Image (tube, helix red, strand yellow):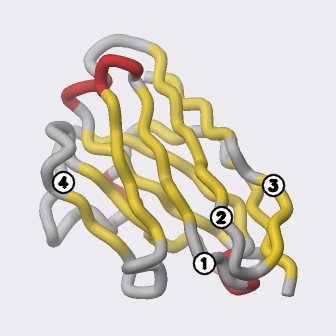
């Protein structure tokens, strides 16, 4: 599976962006998809994830209520809608896939098998 993340950019605090993650290759619909982010000088952090059926979703506490993840398996695409952006949301955002996620495993980046190249989000104050 190859992943292409896009949609990043520069936005003012309080603004919105929608990131896309488009997959190529077979069996995308059987993968759970997660978004992670890495700010300069910091470790990569979990942001959000969605199961393969688009029923179960998981969010980091820092983005809960502001971000929303959704997928369309027919389009091999997952979106991350980001609202009420804050300067601390500035990071490179990565999408990744894994076979299955649970509440316990969704946040563990080591369990994800394939990663996209990242898209940069900058939120100005």
Disc 3 vs disc 1: which is toward the camera?
Answer: 1
Q: Quadrant of residue 59?
A: bottom left
- Indicate the secondary structure of the residue bearing disc 1: loop
Per the rendering, the mark at residue 16 is 2
Q: Is residue 58 above or below residue 49?
A: below
Q: How far separated are the C-alphas under marks 3 and 1?
A: 15 Å
Q: Position of residue 120 (x, y in %)?
A: 76, 56
Residue 90 lies, in percent from the top left, at: 73, 74
- Mark 4 closeness class: few <14, some 14–19, many ≥20 residues within 10 Å: many
Relative image position of residue 69 (x, y in whole percent) = 38, 54
| Residue at mark 4 | 101
Instruction: Give the CA separation, mark 3 to mark 2.
Output: 10 Å
* Mark 1 residue crowding within 10 angstroms, few (<14) / some (14–19) / many (20+): some
Rate crowding at label 2 as few (under 14), some (14 to 19) or many (20 or more) other CA atoms within 10 Å: some
Tag 3 or tag 4, which sits nearer the N-term? Answer: 3
Mark toward the start of the polypeptide (1 vs 2): 2
At mark 3, the secondary structure is: strand
Number of residues whose C-alpha sits closer than 10 Å to that of mark 3, classed few (under 14), some (14–19) or many (20 or more): some
The CA span between labels 1 and 2 is 6 Å
The label shown at residue 95 is none
| Circle 1/circle 2 CB separation < 8 Å | yes
- SS at circle 4: loop
Q: Earlier in the sequence, mark 3 or mark 1?
A: 3
Vertical placement of 65 versus 92: above or below? below
Residue that carries the numbered disc 3 in the rendered image: 9
Label 3–label 2 contact, CB within 8 A:
no
Q: Image point 26% across, 43% down: which residue?
A: 32
Query: Between marks 4 and 3, how big is the CA–CA gap?
Result: 29 Å
Q: CA distance from mark 4 to mark 2?
A: 27 Å
Instruction: Report if the CB atoms under discs 4 and 2 are less than 8 Å apart.
Output: no
**Which element type, helix, strand or loop, lies under badge 2?**
loop
């Amino acid at each position: 599976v190859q992943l292409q993340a896009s949609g990043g950019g520069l936005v003012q605090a309080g603004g919105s962006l929608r990131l896309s993650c488009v997959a190529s290759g077979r069996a995308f619909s059987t993968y759970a998809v997660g978004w992670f982010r890495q700010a300069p000088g910091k470790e990569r952090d979990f942001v959000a994830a969605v199961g393969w059926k688009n029923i179960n979703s998981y969010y980091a506490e820092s983005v809960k209520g502001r971000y929303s993840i959704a997928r369309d398996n027919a389009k091999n695409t997952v979106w991350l809608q980001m609202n009420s952006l804050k300067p601390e949301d500035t990071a490179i955002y990565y999408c990744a896939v894994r076979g299955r996620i649970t509440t316990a495993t969704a946040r563990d980046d080591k369990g994800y098998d394939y990663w996209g190249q990242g898209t940069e989000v900058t939120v100005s104050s």
